[in-house]
Amino acid sequence: MKEYLYHYTSLATCIEYILPNRELKFNKIKESNDPPEYIRNLSDFNFKKGSKEFRKGFQNTEFVSFCQGLKNDPEKFGFLNYPMWAHYGDGHKGVCLVFDKEKLVTELIDQHDDCKSGDYIRYCPAMPNVKDTGESIFERINNSDIDLFFTKTDGWSYENEFRLIVPPRKKDAKKSNRFLNIEESLKGIIIGYKVNVVYNDLFLTLGAAFQGVRLFKLSLSNGQFKVEEPNEFFSEGCNLDQINFEPEVFNYSISKSKKNPNL
């Protein structure tokens, strides 16, 4: 069964950077919106200098996040995560991008020939102390260190996060951040229901640059969210390739009063 991942973003970031450049930007862990995640307890390290260097390498490690969805549970579809729309989708004025997980991971492997890692986030009551294993940041990335890179506190569990990790950039790197080309993995663009209709044709143009990407629009009617096919919402003449993107998923309507308590 094919698995999809979902990336929420603002309208401006989507139409000005992600879609035109066909890439996602990795962010440094120290730029995370969760301070306990990047200000970690390193008391297990014996040498102050060693802990300082390790902390610097850890905080400059880069990541990009996605929301997972459970296809057998309509209330857990990744594009119907209400807190994610509120916090990362600019209050429904943004966009949710849909990715083929297998192809996304393949792109990561093909484009980053040094160490990299990807896994689901584990949620716990408190962040674990970081153990001094004697391994470098690069080795711990390659070993998918769960406590270090793939753990967050319970308060973030609504994100249902899947994360990709790459090492810090070298000092002489031309760009301060890494990027991931998404030409093969991007499969769907779901536009927030508050996005103005003046952007319809722009999304058609940007989406047409990708092979097999389908466009959808969230709508809200009688307290229910619906996802509409392009021909129901966009201008006529949409010639995007039609792929097997589990279209039955997008015919589902969910009442706002039936929010999943786990989100």
Image (cartoon, rainbow, N blue to C red):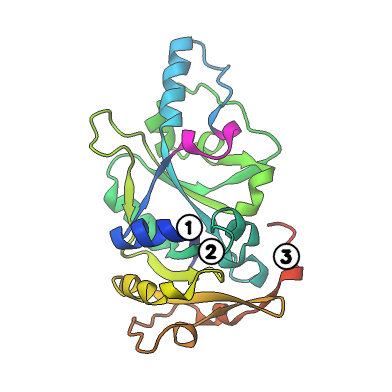
Helix, strand or loop at label 2? It is: loop
Tag 1 residue: 10
Q: In the rendering, at what x and y percent does residue 230 appear?
A: 45, 82
Mark 2 surroundings: few (<14), some (14-19) or many (≥20) residues within 10 A: some
Residue receiving disc 3? 259
Query: Mark 2 or mark 3, which is nearer to you?
Result: 2
| Residue bounds of the magenta highlight | 28-37
Q: Secondary structure at mark 1?
A: loop
> Is residue 120 something one can see in this rendering?
yes
Please tell me which residue lies in front, 22 or 124: 22
Q: Position of residue 125 (x, y in %)?
A: 71, 38
Residue 99, position as x, y percentages in the image: 43, 64
Q: CA distance from mark 2 to mark 3?
A: 20 Å
Closer to the chain start, of discs 2 and 1, is 1
As for residue 241 lying within the magenta part, the answer is no
- Residue named by callout 2: 93
The C terminus sits in image quarter? bottom right
Q: Amino acid at mark 2?
A: Lys
| Vertical comparison of 113 with 21: above or below | above
Side of 221 where 216 appears, left or right: left
On the image, which quarter does residue 12 sit in? bottom left
Callout 2–callout 1 Cβ contact below 8 Å: yes
In this orientation, which residue lies closer to the viewer: 81 or 147?
81
- The secondary structure that dominates the magenta segment is helix
Q: Residues within 10 Å of mark 1 (few under 14, many from 20)?
A: some
